[in-house]
Amino acid sequence: LFRQTYLQMYFRTQISQDPDVASAAAAIRSLLEFLKRDQSETLLGLRENLTEAIRRLGEADSSVAVSSGGELFLRFITLTSLEHLDFSQSKNLLVERGELFLNKISLSRNKVAKLCHTFIKDGAKILTHSSSRVVLKVLENAAADKKRFSVYVTESQPDSAGKLMAEKLRRLNIPVTVILDAAVGYIMEKVNLVIVGAEGVVESGGIINKIGTYQLAVCSKAHNKPFYVVAESFKFVRLFPLNQQDVPAQFKYKADILKTAEDLDKEHPMIDYTPPSLITLLFTDLGVLTPSAVSDELIKIYL
Amino acid sequence: MPVTDKEVALSERIEAFLAELKRGGSGAGTLRGSGETARETTALLRRITGQAQWSSAGDLMEIIRKEGRRMMATQPSETTVGNMVRRVLKIIREEYARLRGSSEVTDQQESLHQLLTSGGLSEENFGQHFKDLRANVIEAINELLTELEATTDHIAMQALEHIHSNEVIMTIGRSRTVEAFLKDAALKRKFHVIVAECAPFCQGHEMATSLSEAGIETTVIADAAIFAVMSRVNKVIIGTQTVLANGGLRAVNGTHTLALAARHHSTPLIVCAPMFKLSPQFHNEEDTFHKFVSPHEVLPFTEGEILSKVNVYCPVFDYVPPELITLFISNIGGNAPSYTYRLMSELYHPEDHEL
């Protein structure tokens, strides 16, 4: 039990020390730490402990990203340990590979930004939603490429994350305007393209992101504006929601609300699902993908 | 290093090809149509493989990449050159992997799976020397050449499945692939073709003449009449210059109009495009996507008074988004536009997308 609370503390310190790190990456690092201290003798025992640890992490931060990071790590453990029949040998290999894996995914954001910033033309007006570190990196790269563009950010209630994003953009000397969530339809005729991040990319090629993204996508489809999604590949998750209701309740609400709320129906959800028909292209570290290509990538890993 | 006679002959050949490319872009020169360009490029790459000095696969790939960049810079709108270079690079990778005994070339491809299982950043530098590599690569390129020669026939063979008796087909401009497609169907079926002339070059006229010589009932219409006539049309069959990575097209100007009219009337839009036209580019590249030619065709220089007061443009290409397309017919069969990413991953290696 001591180990479990330590795990949550470790995860929280990771996030607070480095606010730029993706939550899935922080989750994977915490799980790697857990793995180093784990005492199991068999693969099955390790998997059980890890599943419990992932559940605990979910209690600290109930977002899709942490869940997908956890699943990926579990898959990684299974695939790597299958290479050696002797479990104690694979333990060292696991830790080594885990570090390598973490190194690789720390580079993903840069890869995504490199792919996407060429789609931003000079004089472009970009609309984005809430605060996304990947979108920030993309815009940073485009600005460094001496492109002139301006950004509209939605305020994104209930946590006003859009205002944070605007602050960060102002520091990069990019002209930015914060708009009301309700003003998306009003502003859509002025913008040239829409770029959003994603907390999770689902099997159908759709995305799970901050509430308000679906609205934004429907509006941009109505105005024929390209709707681009930027996400690293570790956010790919094995869900296939057919509508908003299908998204599991554990992702929709913050962890503390899940524990204390009496009637979840009365709570405001924090995320929504955007179907693939509204998305033009997804920029990932695996390349520029059309929504139909996403399920191919997922099949390759979970085959 | 002393320059041998073979190398001199090789570089002369390359220079001659580059000059052809440059001229071929403006309609003159001997390179007619992208099929020929593709064949010439592949033949040249085979010659480079055979005659250049290289000891490992890595060297050969570097040489081909360098020559490929030069060829692409000469005529950026002719994407088949780049596509063939990428095909050859993939061939080299495959042959190298086969000689090394690796089970799957997909080991090298980026995927979530690879992120998880590989130990160490994969640095495949293709440094090993194999005696048989040269012969194997040349043989594979020969296979590619045979495939290229047969593409139009393979596409035309599928015509009977798509064209039925008494149908009205619409097309635009002149495409050799569509011409062969329609002529093949005409051997067994009787149907009517409407050709949009495609101003200002009016290649539709040549297409109509050629089709009527084959005994097909043809009508030529002006581009402005496309929407008006569309309600009578059963299918629209067009060719294209390039198929983009998202399933969209870079086709002759006027095609987007045709596609929108077809979408409005819910008429299926079929694109006949051989595999060598599939390019890993997107339509965001401002500098290389569009090509403009002399505005003389739009507003002749004799109209001097107006010329000083207006800007006249004559773009050659149009972008058609993938949502407007129903089916792609290529030499390997029919595919939906959303499947393009898969065909691309089979033809090209992701690292070669940017030469």
Image (cartoon, coloured by chain):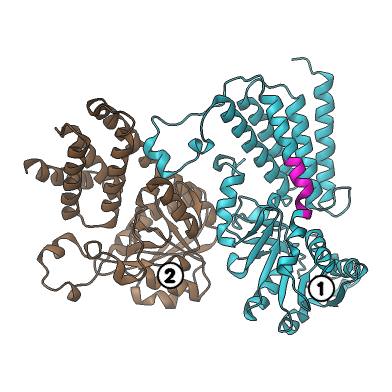
Q: Which chain shows up in brown?
A: A
Q: Name the amino acid, label 1.
A: Val
The secondary structure type at the circle numbered 2 is helix
x, y percent for residue A1: 6, 44
x, y percent for residue A75: 31, 43
Q: Which residue is mark 1?
A: B195
Residue A198: name its quadrant. bottom left
The secondary structure type at the circle numbered 1 is strand
Residue B149 visible somewhere in the drawing: yes
Tell me the magenta residue range.
Answer: B144-153
Q: Residue furthest front?
A: B188
Please tell me how crowded label 2 is: few (under 14), some (14-19), or many (20+) other residues with Cα within 10 Å.
many
x, y percent for residue B49: 73, 29
Q: Which chain shows up in cyan?
A: B
Rendered image: mark on residue A217:
2
Q: In the figure, is residue B168 to the left or right of A88?
A: right
